[in-house]
Image: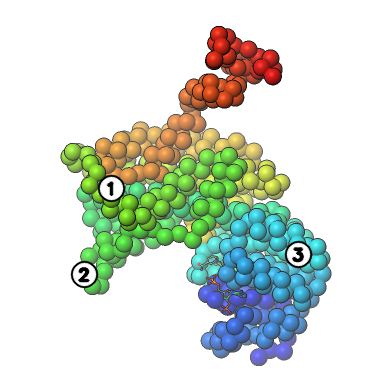
């Protein structure tokens, strides 16, 4: 084992930490120190990967002693309390100027809190979202670091060396200060939920309305993956659909229990967006759809409720498949547009200077939502970083305009067939809401004024007004009512 000091350390030797440490060790010029609460796991990782030449820390103090100063350590442990515990231990043995990076899936408000506390000691704290699962950690993830810009000067080259590469560029950028990195990672995961739900709805329609087999749908997705929908999620969906169950010989998808799990980042995204007042309806529907799927007692109790009297006929299968493709693309554009809205509002609320085009760029490789289409988002923000809404960028306006009729036909078919398509339908409803000249919100304002004197504004003059609903129903200026 080398006597040299390590230039980077990793704490947490479960799958993510050990893979990230191996990735770091495989890059020229890096010597990696590793530490784990149960030290034997760190030794086991070092023994299993002698090529990495890891330096094992026997204790937190020993780990700190084996790092060259200023020290840099990436924490990859369970999110929540364990992350706080490790941060506290490192703060005890690190010195001002050292950098602690939390690469776990932290809630961004925890990251803001942690940075505040750690920075008081003179130690830098960086919350970095790391996407791509175990495979990404080993071969190149998409990395979303927040924290002080100053620490990115040290961290940037290290993270760039291990990140995924898209069209020659490493998938890492300094997202913004304190919790910005974990915030953007959270939105990434929310978009991932929406994208997966939309693909699942497309599958359901092809299977149960068009009557295609799992293998035929796999072929459809493989074909779609050569066009504007090209993405990792479409690619793996085809692979999942082609997989056969060894025991029954059936498509694996037919024997998997239809109850979707989650680890909570979708819920965080929706909760945060609700607080910011951003309609992320595609993401919310995806979270709710998983919740519906995971309620066996309620589903059993409702199983005999009526559905459509007869199956809806599809006259032209090929045309329907193309309609579903277009509906998927349009709904996907809405989901991303809503996700970027959340980034814009989050940046305003927390005072982050987030370059939206750079975010789309670092999602092009290494992460789960990697897709061809992200280049179009980068281009849209390169043309106008202050774009009010992504849907209004010329490329996306054009894309949804082309898809619009097909999108409506698909939602109609889904409704007539009794096939749940909450993400397709709500994306279309959002689109129609956004483009509407007048919304029934005027009536809602009238109702609010009736029961709560909440007042309203008028389209034809300045000011705030109230109707004397329980009096003579004349209108008064709101100031007069107080
Ligand atoms: P994990 O199962 O989330 O965590 C296991 C690690 O946490 C072990 O090293 C464990 O040490 C350590 N740990 C637990 N409690 C501790 C405590 N109180 N004090 C000190 N260490 C403690 O591991 P993971 O799946 O590799 O994920 C690591 C982080 O990456 C998590 O934040 C996760 O959310 C995030 N992440 C995971 C994925 C993924 O695909 N798995 C993807 C992206 C991000 P012991 O061995 O001593 O128990």
Nearer mark to the viewer, of 2 and 3 = 3
Q: Image point 58% across, 56% down: which residue?
A: 185
Q: Is residue 42 visible?
A: no
Q: Residue beneath label 3, please?
A: 118
Nearer the N terminus, badge 2 or badge 3?
3
Residue drawn at x 52%, y 64% as measured from the top left: 132
- For disc 1, the marked residue is 302
Q: Which image quadrant: the C terminus?
A: top right
Question: Could you tell me which quadrant the N terminus lies in?
Answer: bottom right
Q: Nearer the viewer, residue 261 or 469?
A: 469
Residue 105 versus residue 359 in the image, above or below: below
Q: Nearer the viewer, residue 20 or 447?
A: 447
21 vs 418, left or right, is right
- Determine whether 139 is above or below 329 in the image: below
Instruction: Check whether the beta carbons of the residues at disc 2 and disc 3 lie within 8 A of each other.
Output: no
**Residue at the farthest front position:** 470
- SS at mark 1 in the image: helix
> Does any portion of residue 396 appear in the rendered image?
yes
Q: Secondary structure at mark 3?
A: helix
Nearest-to-viewer mark from 2 and 1 = 1
Q: Give residue 150's position: percent from left, percent from top.
A: 77, 60
**Residue 318: image x %, image y %?**
25, 44
Disc 3/disc 1 C-alpha distance (Å)? 52 Å
Indicate the quadrant where residue 65 lies.
bottom right
The disc at residue 248 is 2
Q: Is residue 443 left or right of residue 234?
A: right
- Marking on residue 239: none
Query: Which badge, 2 or 1, is on the more N-terminal residue?
Result: 2
């Amino acid at each position: 084992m080398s006597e040299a000091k390590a230039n980077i350390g990793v704490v947490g030797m479960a799958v993510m930490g050990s893979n990230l440490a191996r990735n770091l060790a495989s890059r020229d010029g890096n010597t990696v120190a590793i530490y784990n609460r149960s030290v034997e796991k760190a030794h086991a990782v070092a023994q299993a990967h002698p090529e990495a030449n890891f330096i094992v820390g026997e204790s937190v103090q020993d780990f700190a002693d084996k790092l060259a100063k200023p020290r840099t350590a990436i924490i990859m442990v369970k999110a929540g309390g364990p992350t706080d515990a490790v941060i506290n231990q490192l703060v005890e043995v690190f010195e001002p100027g050292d950098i602690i990076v939390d690469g776990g899936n932290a809630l961004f408000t925890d990251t803001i809190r942690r940075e505040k506390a750690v920075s008081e000691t003179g130690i830098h704290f960086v919350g970095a979202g790391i996407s791509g699962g175990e495979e990404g950690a080993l071969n190149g993830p998409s990395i979303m670091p927040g924290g002080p810009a100053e620490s990115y000067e040290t961290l940037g080259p290290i993270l760039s060396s291990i990140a995924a590469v898209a069209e020659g560029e490493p998938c890492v950028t300094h997202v913004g200060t304190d919790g910005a990195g974990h915030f953007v990672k959270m939105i990434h995961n929310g978009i991932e939920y929406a994208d997966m739900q939309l693909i699942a709805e497309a599958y359901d329609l092809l299977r149960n309305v068009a009557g295609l087999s799992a293998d035929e749908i796999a072929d459809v997705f493989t074909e779609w993956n050569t066009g504007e929908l090209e993405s990792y999620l479409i690619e793996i969906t085809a692979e999942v659909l082609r997989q056969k169950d060894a025991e029954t010989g059936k498509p694996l998808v037919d024997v998997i229990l239809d109850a979707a799990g989650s680890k909570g980042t979708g819920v965080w995204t929706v909760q945060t967006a609700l607080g910011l007042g951003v309609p992320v309806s595609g993401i919310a529907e995806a979270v709710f759809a998983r919740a519906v799927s995971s309620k066996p007692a309620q589903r059993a109790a409702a199983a005999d409720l009526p559905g459509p009297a007869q199956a809806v006929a599809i006259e032209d299968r090929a045309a329907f498949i193309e309609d579903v493709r277009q509906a998927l693309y349009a709904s996907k554009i809405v989901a991303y547009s809503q996700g970027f809205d959340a980034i814009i509002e989050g940046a305003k609320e927390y005072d982050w200077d987030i370059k939206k085009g750079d975010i789309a760029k670092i999602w092009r490789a290494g992460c789960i939502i990697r897709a061809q289409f992200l280049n179009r988002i980068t281009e849209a923000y390169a043309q106008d970083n202050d774009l009010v809404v992504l849907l209004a960028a010329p490329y996306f306006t054009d894309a949804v305009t082309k898809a619009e009729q097909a999108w409506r036909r698909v939602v109609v078919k889904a409704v007539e067939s009794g096939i749940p398509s909450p993400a397709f339908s709500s994306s279309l409803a959002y689109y129609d809401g956004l483009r509407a000249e007048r919304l029934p919100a005027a009536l809602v304002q009238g109702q609010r004024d009736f029961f709560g004197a909440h007042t309203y504004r008028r389209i034809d003059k300045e000011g705030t007004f109230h109707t004397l609903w329980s009096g003579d129903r004349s209108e008064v200026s709101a100031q007069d009512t107080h």
